[in-house]
Image (cartoon, rainbow, N blue to C red):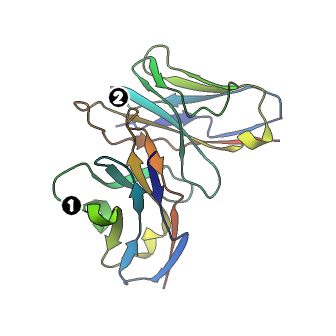
Amino acid sequence: GAGVSQSPRYKVTKRGQDVALRCDPISGHVSLYWYRQALGQGPEFLTYFNYEAQQDKSGLPNDRFSAERPEGSISTLTIQRTEQRDSAMYRCASSTVAGGLPDTQYFGPGTRLTVL
Amino acid sequence: AQSVTQPDIHITVSEGASLELRCNYSYGATPYLFWYVQSPGQGLQLLLKYFSGDTLVQGIKGFEAEFKRSQSSFNLRKPSVHWSDAAEYFCAVGANSGYALNFGKGTSLLVTP
């Protein structure tokens, strides 16, 4: 079956431009997570959704970052007025909800964002 | 706040030798612990996880990990390393908020002939 997919896989943009990163979770997965991974670091939590509701956005660095999941499936992470420090790998993960216990998060291949 | 420490940034082992990757966590309650592997150009793949029960957990590709509460550790082991095991390994703990994962900085494994 299909795993988590992300698009685009690579994005190069100029400073000040807006970018939208897309995540298509595994079919039927309720929870969707966004992480950011800088070079040489582990992934860092940004935000997550249960169905269409954004449950926690405490990891978003500032108000230039936003995310949505309007129909409880595909999610978009938007970065406005990009800066060079936003350059990183952006990873999406999805999971089922298993009786309140954590479940395995399945990660997509990531989007490599480069801001020039 | 919970945190994860992977003390070794790089480890080099010979093919066929045993492997142990260290992971220490800081968390007030019973942690939910994970090991992921990231191969070059690939996404993160789950190796194994610990939620409760038997403290020795078996994973894929011949890996195992042991949860030791007294030492706040969850070290990853493999008896005999293969060249294809060369990758980046991440330890993670599940946080309260929707169980978003808090990752360590990773250990890069190099396997020599």
Task: Give the image quarter of residue B26.
Answer: bottom left
Q: Callout 2: helix, strand or loop?
A: loop
Q: Which of B72 and A76 is in front in this view?
A: B72
Which residue is painted at 62% across and 35% down in the image? A8
Give the letter of the chain under mark 1: B
A87 is higher (above) or lower (below) than B69? above
Q: Which amino acid does label 2 sit on?
A: His
The mark closer to the camera, 2 or 1, is 1
A16 is higher (above) or lower (below) than B42? above
Q: Which amino acid does label 1 sit on?
A: Thr
Q: What is the crowding at mark 2: few (fewer than 14 residues within 10 Å), some, or many (at least 20)?
A: some
Task: Give the image quarter of residue B79.
Answer: bottom left
Q: Report the residue that reaches farthest toward the left.
A: B53
| Labels in figure, total | 2
Which residue is painted at 45% across and 75% down in the image? B83
Q: What is the crowding at mark 1: few (fewer than 14 residues within 10 Å), some, or many (at least 20)?
A: some
Which residue is painted at 50% across and 65% down in the image? B87
Residue that label 2 marks? A29
**Would you say residue B96 is visible in this rendering?**
yes
Give the letter of the chain under mark 2: A
Q: Which of A64 and A22 is in front in this view?
A: A64
Residue that label 1 marks? B55
A73 is higher (above) or lower (below) than B75? above
Apparent side of residue A4 relative to residue A66 in the rendered image (left or right):
left
**Would you say residue B66 is visible in this rendering?**
no
